[in-house]
Image (tube, coloured by chain):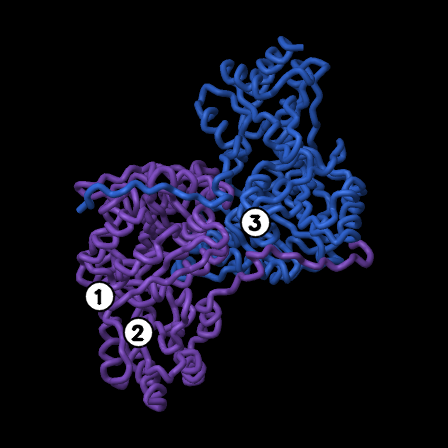
Chain colours: A purple, B blue
Amino acid sequence: MKIDNPNPIEWTFSERAQQLQSSAIREILKITQRPEITSFAGGLPSPATFPVERMKAAYDKVLSETGKQALQYGPTDGYAPLREWVANYLSTEDCRIQPEQILMVSGSQQALDLLGKVLIDEGSRVLVETPSYLGALQAFSVYRPEFKSVETDEHGLVPSSLEGVAEGARLLYSLPNFQNPTGRSLSLERRRELVETCARLRLPLIEDDPYGALSYKGEPMPRMLNMNPDGVIYMGSFSKVLTPGIRLGYVCAPLPLVRRLELAKQAADLHTAQLTQMVVHEVVKDGFLDQHIPTIRTLYASQCQAMLDAMDEHFPKSVSWTRPEGGMFIWVTLPENIDSRKLLDQAIAARVAFVPGAPFYANDEVANTLRLSFVTVPPERIREGIAVLGALIRAQV
Amino acid sequence: MKIDNPNPIEWTFSERAQQLQSSAIREILKITQRPEITSFAGGLPSPATFPVERMKAAYDKVLSETGKQALQYGPTDGYAPLREWVANYLSTEDCRIQPEQILMVSGSQQALDLLGKVLIDEGSRVLVETPSYLGALQAFSVYRPEFKSVETDEHGLVPSSLEGVAEGARLLYSLPNFQNPTGRSLSLERRRELVETCARLRLPLIEDDPYGALSYKGEPMPRMLNMNPDGVIYMGSFSKVLTPGIRLGYVCAPLPLVRRLELAKQAADLHTAQLTQMVVHEVVKDGFLDQHIPTIRTLYASQCQAMLDAMDEHFPKSVSWTRPEGGMFIWVTLPENIDSRKLLDQAIAARVAFVPGAPFYANDEVANTLRLSFVTVPPERIREGIAVLGALIRAQV
């Protein structure tokens, strides 16, 4: 049936497509999936924490009782009972969140894409932390903003540094809890100061919070959302507290914005799978996360400690690193003469992997940084892998 | 914890967001979900066709045997065994499709968004049928193209009409089988002519094919993809042959394009749910669709015939309509003096609903057209509803 000698297409891609780049992390992950590699490169939660039996029971129940509804098209804004659950979950005594403020999305990466689509024009100023989450930089980049990196220190973002750069900015993107990549958290004082500064500057503040529940001490910090629900856009996810492979997250935003996001979502994929939302509602509605999350915290806390102990033992004094109190990542600063990308080549040859820090910087890359994840590697391999890394670093200092 | 007297945000939306509009269909659907309304407005497949038990068994099997993998993050391009299945499904004797050409997406609406993102700049010329699928117009609109409507007649798109308008166009979007909204199909002769014309003009041709398997005679027409796999971008979906609520589709494209689409998808939502893809693979891998699709065809064919019979009986001679040989829709052309939007108001008052035709036109709206779907309404209600519509039309001619 083929036609004869068709002309080849000379593809003309859009300007935004010409600059699309694969995430450095996902490229590294392809290399490091070999079982002989001890990989600290992943951003994946530990599958040991996935409540498979609970999920299976919920799929069975939802399909048995409401199968036809679960398998039909659904509303763009999401499954109403789950939106109500999320609104309740995000409410505090003096700040009720309404279900109308919640848009269910296909993983919080989609929230980043929709926020970029709705808020960013070519050349719009977008403020991000130094360093920031790579997936957010990638999602926003599609819409071709001018990124401006905002100063951070060991307590996270420095609110006073917004003064000079907030003029005309469309948004500030922040990860206040156990940030990816640094593992740092914003102190309570800083949170209030940041929310007040953004409100004064009329700057929309995005609070991306996939790790907030994974506080090792079990006491999550207050959400900035609840300090100013009219100025803060909150992003949440079931990926780190339940499972990531189902792709389910949510965004909570002031009504004028959330309705735009809903329209953008309708054009992007109509809606997130009904069945997934009904199953997750079935799993979480009676308080399951209250029992489940502590088991994740305990696991991650012990693996984090194993890595910190190994680093204390094997890394030279000229290396510094963060000591996270939750989440999945440790951020390492090497002596200035070591480029972590070159170190990665040596490390992979020695069967250890991590993510170099450079791609996490929106503006001036810092080459002597790297990110380590401890959540999917057993303590024994953590110790061995850190010993290998320590030896490679020592050879260069 | 709230801060005192925050300044209200004055939202600055992106230019693309300012023109986002809700689909006319989804707005009408909200009105017509009341059970007393006989709705021919839906584009939803009949839930009577959903293989709930089969899906339930597959969820149980996948979660029991490979639960941790199914619930973990997965590759952006999709679950490899399902991509292989799709590639085989799309192959013909003289045209093998490679798994590398397949990108799994979260419903084929997402393929439309990704194609728009990667191929359309502001002002790019985009060619569409007259009329065309509303969801495609909506998805592409986000990227602000200049739409140019291409001539159609009772055999579908007229290939010769591309000559004057293809210059510099980024793509031609077509629905060759039982088109939404008209129910029309492109003849075999026209398909070859269209593929040849596009190849000669070096014009990328999108073949959107959600309904192709729903041919009432059981003999699907050849895909244009297989006539020129280097120039045709094929979009398929499990929504109409399995269930839509799981949100699963795929796009098959030449390698340079599919890799760009993959990067765009990575930024948009990382990947489509692993569990969903593994379950669908489990359901379809042993030929289930070969038994299942005929049951959908039989149901839709009989309901289509019921509607056509009722139209023959109740509609005046001055009304004309298509006689689809597959799919889910009939397209009606009223006398020129009747605006279908006004007719809809009267119809809803009489408890019958349909979709006015105007939003399906990218350029010059034709007000005296409308779309009817017969798939979710039982024959008895089809007859009553058509009688009501016939009476309302007769009153105006």
| Tag 2–tag 3 contact (CB < 8 Å) | no
At label 3, the amino acid type is Ala
Viewer-side label of 2, 3? 3
Which residue is identified by label 3? B111
Residue A17: image tag = none
> Is residue B178 among what the camera can see?
yes
Say what secondary structure mark 2 lies in: loop
Q: For label 3, count other residues whose C-alpha is less than 10 Å away and answer few (under 14), some (14-19) or many (20+).
A: many
Residue B94: image location, x then y, percent: 76, 58
The residue marked by circle 2 belongs to what chain? Answer: A
Q: Which image quadrant for residue B146?
A: top right
Q: Are marks 3 and 1 on the same chain?
A: no
In the image, what residue occupies the spot 64% across and 44% down? B209
Q: How many marks?
A: 3
Q: Which residue is mark 1?
A: A325
Mark toward the start of the polypeptide (2 vs 1): 1
B392 to B303, vertically: above or below = above
Quick check: A305 above or below B368? Answer: below
Nearer-the-camera pick, A279 or A367: A367
**Which is more toward the observer, B190 or A370?**
A370
Q: Are the residues flagged by discs 2 and 3 from a single subunit?
A: no
Determine the secondary structure under disc 3. helix
In space, the residues marked 2 and 3 are separated at their CA atoms by 39 Å
Q: Position of residue A211 (x, y in %)?
A: 29, 58
Amino acid under disc 2: Pro
Q: Is residue B20 above or below residue B234?
A: above
Give the residue type at disc 1: Glu
At 43% across and 69% down in the image, what residue appears?
A359
Disc ID at residue A378: 2
Whether marks 2 and 1 lie on the same chain: yes
